[in-house]
Amino acid sequence: MTDSYYDRLVDEDALATFLEDQLGEADDYDVERHQEGHSNETLFVTWGERDLVLRRPPPGETAETAHDVVREYEVMDAVAATDVPVPNPVLACEDHDVIGSDFYLMDRLEGDVLREGEPDRFAAPDHRRRMGEELVDTLAKVHRLDYEALGLGEFGYPDGYTDRQVERWGQQLMWAFEVTADEREVPDLYEVGSWLQENAPDKHPHTLVHGDYKLDNVMFGPGTPPELVAVFDWEMATLGDPRADLGWMLSYWRDPKDPDPTIPELVTRFMEREGYPTRLELVDRWEERTGLEFEHERFYRALAVYKLAGLGEMFFRRYLEGNSDNPMYPKMEDRVPALAARAKRIVEGDEPL
């Protein structure tokens, strides 16, 4: 990342002045960009004896118009008072004179985010099972929250959430196809999209949904047995259908019987090892913890893979237009059709839960 890009992310002097005003003086001050940031940028900030995390939109047009980080702060601030573990929210700022965008700060936690593999201390069947149980138990806690009592009653429009998901991702795919169709077509996605439109459940439970809940968006603490200490990346949170959250989490979870992953660059396979719960066991536990049923499971699992295909196709368009040098993006020429075929297998019952 070039210095000029970093300079657009943060004015260190202006941020220091702001922090001194809000948190008091500090002898030690340091800012470091976290390279694992996703759609929003993540910076590690040392302020005296406090280790903080700053979240802001990427610079440019988004930074001037988006309010998603303030929204993310608001939901975390509400959830922090519950048994759902989140980093302690410190403050939010909508004054663009500080760093050029909205941002918020939260306390930094110690632990492991499992992206590439499992920590050695968890490499035993009982610990592996506990990791899967902690993951699904925490999702169930999110879905059991009384969002009205938390002041989140106006946080979204749960009616029609599932229909809107199908429509939104269909539109994203159509946008990508404007460019990518000149390279190759993906007819399976048209078929899956039509099936999703026809089979979207008429009614669904209304809960707070995370929107991007999966293993690498949570942190496990530094000890054993495994303890899930934080849920991150709430920027997609809203009121909606909890079964969509479960379907999304399951789309990233591997069973030993599974075929090779369609996008190996994004999927780790360590949960195929002895001890990890199967997808079916995770579903059973979620149903037990929430009192809800994972009805229409083929729909929700197919929707999750359809959304992954939509993301991949948008990546491919950006590559074709010369708007990204990410080495993974050109691979979407073949990866997206493979995802589409997987979604079709789920729809047709050929890839059971």
Image (cartoon, grey):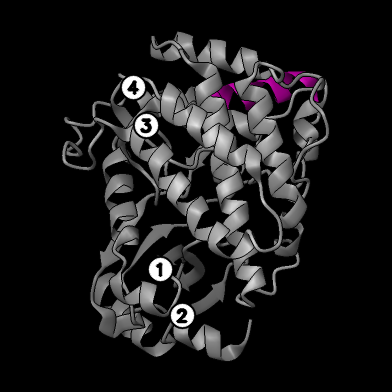
Q: Say which element carries label 4.
A: helix
* Separation of residues labelled 2 and 3 (CA atoms): 35 Å
Labels 2, 3: front one: 3
Q: Quadrant of the C terminus?
A: top right
State which tag comes first along the sequence, 4 or 1. 1
Q: Is residue 94 left or right of residue 41?
A: left
Q: Is residue 126 magenta?
A: yes
Q: Which residue is mark 3?
A: 162
Labels 3, 4: front one: 3
From the top left corner, tell me how far across and down residue 46 is, in percent. 49, 71
Are the residues tagged 3 and 4 within 8 Å (C-beta)? no
Q: Looking at the image, which residue is at 22% across and 37% down?
A: 157
- Residue 144's tag is 4
Residue 39 versus residue 210 in the image, above or below: below
Are the residues tagged 1 and 2 within 8 Å (C-beta)? yes
Residue type at numbered disc 3:
Thr
Depth check, front residue: 83 or 342: 342
* Separation of residues labelled 3 and 4 (CA atoms): 19 Å
The boundaries of the magenta stretch are 124-136
State which tag comes first along the sequence, 3 or 4. 4
Q: Looking at the image, which residue is at 49% across and 53% down?
A: 174
Labels 3, 1: front one: 3
* Separation of residues labelled 3 and 1 (CA atoms): 28 Å
Residue type at numbered disc 4:
Arg
Q: Say which element carries label 1.
A: strand
Are the residues tagged 2 and 3 within 8 Å (C-beta)? no
* Separation of residues labelled 4 and 1 (CA atoms): 29 Å
Q: Looking at the image, which residue is at 34% across and 82% down?
A: 100
Residue type at numbered disc 1:
Arg
Residue neighbourhood size for the residue with mark 3, other residues' Cα within 10 Å, grouped as few (<14), some (14–19), many (≥20): many
Q: Which residue is mark 2?
A: 9
